[in-house]
Amino acid sequence: MNVVLGPNRYGKAETRVVRVVRDGGVHHIKDINVSSALSGDMEDVHLTGDNASVLPTDTQKNTAYAFARKYGVDQIEDFAILLARHYVDSQPSIHHARVEIEEYFWDRIPVSDGPHLGLRDKQHSFVRSGREVRTCVVHHDRDGRTTVVSGLKDLVVLNSTGSEFHGYIEDEYTTLKPTSDRILATAVSARWRHASDGSAFGKSYAEVRRCLIEAFAETHSLSLQQTLYAMGKRVLNTRREVCEVRMAMPNKHHFLVDLEPFGMDNPNEVFYAADRPYGLIEGSVLSDTAPDAAFAWE
Ligand SMILES: O=c1[nH]c(=O)c2[nH]c(=O)[nH]c2[nH]1
């Protein structure tokens, strides 16, 4: 039997970078989590322990911090592209870089004008937002190919009506009752592939997020699968820079509580929000003119 080295990559996972920009007393913060993974001439390090081709993961961590200082952090996709190109372009042994970034949102804490400080002098307090996490994954290789996938996760949404589920298979194990009025709730994870690496990523993110939320709210749902497809389709029909959307949506079940033992009816008012098990609905929607995905989803 012959043993060979299979696909491999290495890098620094979850470098937490918080960048503060000071505009007088008005501060802005960017809170991100950067993971880099590099691959290339890595036979020797695996087979013999020769590290000559290895850019240490510690250096990758330092590079994330140094680039945050040098270039600032605006859109996470642009920062990821900068890092990915740097690794491949500066090191001949690195043939491919994958940079993944998560961004956590902070909201400003409103402050009232004090006796000594004007409002412009004290805008430096924030509360961690209950919003979703923004994500991106960028790949860049030594042939100059760059792919960008943007995304979000933990975008929690709920429709308190406008959702039905019936007409499904019923076999000897089925106990689920058909319903024509249920709560539909989910935590959306969505990732979308850009047709090029030149999107205006900030505006694109805001608009894709809006499409997802509006399509969720506006779709009278006969299944979460149907809602998922409607959400992805809305994005593709509205945002030309996006060519493929992949989504995972847990069905956060809300069960009507039986109040009869207490002599009460329950006309769709009191629910038990179960956390597990949950249905997990996953799917993708893509344009028939989408360019080849290459390594975008890896
Ligand atoms: O929207 C739904 N899709 C399903 O496939 C499913 N299965 C189930 O038990 N409830 C639901 N709801």
Image (cartoon, rainbow, N blue to C red):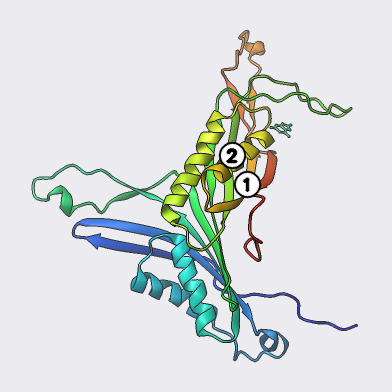
Residue at (19, 57) in percent of width and height: 25
For the question of whether residue 251 can be seen, the reply is no
Number of numbered tags placed on the structure image: 2
- Relative to 244, say whether 221 is above or below: above
* In-front residue for pair 259/254: 254
Nearer to the camera, 139 or 168: 139
Residue 150 position within the rendered picture, expressed as x and y whole percent measured from the top left: 53, 55
- Residue to which mark 1 is pinned: 247
Q: Position of residue 95 (x, y in %)?
A: 61, 80
Amino acid type for the residue under numbered disc 1: Met
**Mark 2 sits on what residue?**
231
Mark 2 surroundings within 10 Å by alpha-carbon count, few (fewer than 14), some (14 through 19), many (20 or more): many
Residue 291 percent coordinates (x, y): 63, 59
Residue drawn at (59%, 39%) of the image: 231
Residue 258: assigned label: none
- Which amino acid type is shown beneath numbered disc 2? Met
The image shows residue 55, relative to residue 8, as above or below, that is: below
Ligand 1 is in which quadrant of the figure? Answer: top right
Image quadrant occupied by the C terminus: bottom right
Q: Is residue 118 above or below residue 158?
A: below
